[in-house]
Image: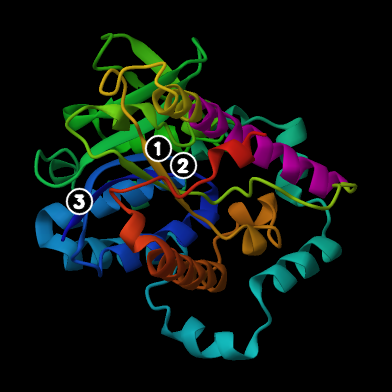
Amino acid sequence: MVKRINLALQGGGAHGAFTWGVLDRLLQDDSIEIAAISGTSAGALNAAALKAGMTEGGRAGARALLDQIWHQVGAVHDLRLTGWIAQALPPVGVINSWMESVMPVSPMDIAALVTSPYQYGPLYRNPLEPVVRSLRFDNVCSREGPELYIAATNVRSGKIRVFSGDELSCDVILASACLPTLFQAVEFTDPKSGKEEAFWDGGYTGNPALFPLFEAHLPDDIMIVNINPLTRDTLPRTAQEIQNRLNEISFNSSLLREMRAIGFVKRLIAEGRMERGKMKDVLLHMIADDELMNTLSVTSKVTPTPYLLHSLKEAGRVACDRFLDQHMADLNTRTTIDLEAMFS
């Protein structure tokens, strides 16, 4: 029996390679059909690559294009070196801690406090642009395959803007991943308003946006791939740790609000205070590895080394395997997140 699901893919810079691994594993399972995808930032890049690859070459095409895109992000064309050398290297969390002890505040962190990306002058170029432009946007915008929704933040209004269908473009993906301390705002004519607008990272307002997946024609199941840890047991004390936790909290806040609203609606339906069918009874699932992500920091999000990307991809595959082993039978049947415990 085929299980139809929607995917909600978080942003988190280089940590999006974890989602790459999750998608790589999901695409190997013919019993799972992806009906729609909502993505933000790195999640938007993953979503667009999956959609474009699947439109042109099915599941194998999607896996191949995801591999190609992340190889470009890592500025390498062959990860086989990483494969054998990884056996002799410590876990990525150990390497991350060592880097921070050597340089607790990176030059990029210092520069972000005293400079603006608008001071880069004519030399400025978004380093992600050639990666995103390598996608075929006729495939990204295709009516075939999963529906695709990409979130960005409108700088002037402060509101979320979700793009889909023919609205999708290279600029939209770059806007969704535009951290304002690193990149100049992405400016283009919004197809909906016809006005020139500026956009920043969608993570500030929807990381990822769940509401586009509530449409009646889509399946009830939303599988969230979470790459920003929801909890940290240790109190952040260093400047780096405090900045890291602030980043995680801010980039999880919109997701938690939507999940709380879903939990409220589910409770009303279960208690008979809302007629079934009046609002969608969403079935939520989550794939994450908070234990691994707790060993990483905001610094590693902007340093996409091939070793980090390879390690995160493998971790994503393992996490997806674990979820499917435990919850495959629950898909299309029940929620696998304890929302009451999460918000108690």
Amino acid type of the residue that numbered disc 1 sits on in the rendered structure: Leu
Marker disc for residue 126:
2
The answer to whether residue 130 is seen in the rendering is: no
Residue assigned mark 3: 52
Question: Mark 3: few, some, or many residues within 10 Å (few <14, many ≥20)?
Answer: many
Residue at x 76% of width, y 32% of height = 114
**Numbered disc 2: secondary structure:** loop
Q: Nearer the viewer, residue 213 or 132?
A: 213
Position of residue 186 in the picture relative to residue 104 (left or right): left
Label located before the other in sequence (3 or 1): 3
Q: Residue at label 1?
A: 174
Instruction: Using the image, determine if residue 3 lies above or below residue 68.
Output: above
Question: Which mark sits nearer the N-terminus, 1 or 2?
Answer: 2
- For marks 2 and 3 on the same chain, the one whose residue lies earlier in the sequence: 3
Q: Position of residue 179 (x, y in %)?
A: 55, 35
CA–CA distance in space, label 1 to label 2:
8 Å
- Specify whether residue 71 is painted magenta: no
Looking at the rendered structure, the kind of residue marked 3 is: Ala
Q: Which residue is situated farthest in the right direction here?
A: 237
Image: 174 above or below 69: above
Which element type, helix, strand or loop, lies under badge 3? helix
Label 2 packing within 10 angstroms: few (<14), some (14-19), many (20+)? few
